[in-house]
Amino acid sequence: MPVRLYGGYDGAERCVAALLGGEDDADMPVEALQITWNGRFDTLAHRDILGALMHMGLGRDSFGDIVEQEGQALVWVHRDLAGYVQENLCQIGRAAVHIRRAQGAALQPPARNVTTVTATVASLRLDALLGIAYGISREKAAQAIRAGLVKLNHVQQLHCDAQVQQGAVLSFRGKGRAVLEKVGGVSRKGRLFVEIQRYI
């Protein structure tokens, strides 16, 4: 049965899934809320907004990505909870916040910078590719995986030797997302050429 993933915008990490029983489209129960505050006096980070939503009693599966912008943020929530958040979330830390349903251009998060990395690897193991994508040693990549900081195709992956396919999405908590864009030929030493795009 076809499955559609939707998180509110192209490239969203946290998505709802719909089973399409012969239908090409589905009404996805996701709404975007725009959170604004006075950026001259207060600074809010992803963790502040996440903590405030969790403190309201919302499970992490009740809302999607949180995208920070200057003096504001976008958060995608389940439609049934949008009104509750809008009416009850008035303050985050010491900052007074205003919430409205995002529409039109406000729905689009800012474009992310993309860095392309090319390298060779002995195999398409997760720890090897994560190390290349984020410029860290394979051991540090393995530590991050075992600590639960890494997702493969939006699902937490705890196995360093998990095999990664072309087109797969890697997510490293706090460090952005990367895509294994291309797996090329084999070098003279038997290593695989790979191209990875990292989104910051």
Image (cartoon, grey):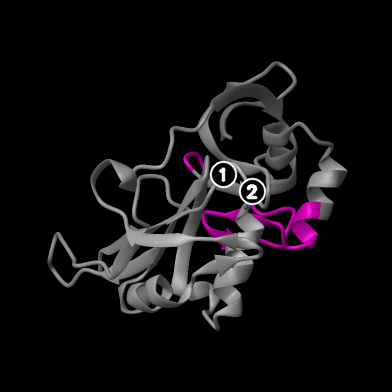
Q: Quadrant of the N terminus?
A: bottom left
Give the magenta range.
144-167
Residue at the image point whose x is 44% and y is 32% from the top: 111
**Label 2, label 1: how many angstroms apart (C-alpha)?**
6 Å
Residue 6, compared with residue 180, is above or below; it is below
| Residue 162 part of the magenta segment | yes
| Residue 122 visible in the displayed image | no
Q: Quadrant of the C terminus?
A: top right
Tag 1: amino acid: Gly
| Residue 148 part of the magenta segment | yes
**Horizontal and vertical percent for residue 61?**
49, 74
**Residue 43 got which mark?**
2
**Residue 39 got which mark?**
1
**Horizontal and vertical percent for residue 48?**
64, 61
Tag 2: amino acid: Thr
Q: Does the CB distance between marks 2 and 1 fall below 8 Å?
A: yes
Residue reaching furthest bottom? 57
Label 1, secondary structure: give it: loop
**Residue 187 got which mark?**
none
**Horizontal and vertical percent for residue 47?**
65, 59
Residue at the image point whose x is 58% and y is 54% from the top: 152
Label 2, secondary structure: give it: loop
Q: Residue 136: which quarter of the image? A: top right
Is 11 on the left-hand or right-hand side of 60? left
Is 134 on the left-hand or right-hand side of 20? right
| Residue 23 visible in the displayed image | yes
Residue 47, compared with residue 181, is above or below; it is below
Residue reaching furthest left? 23
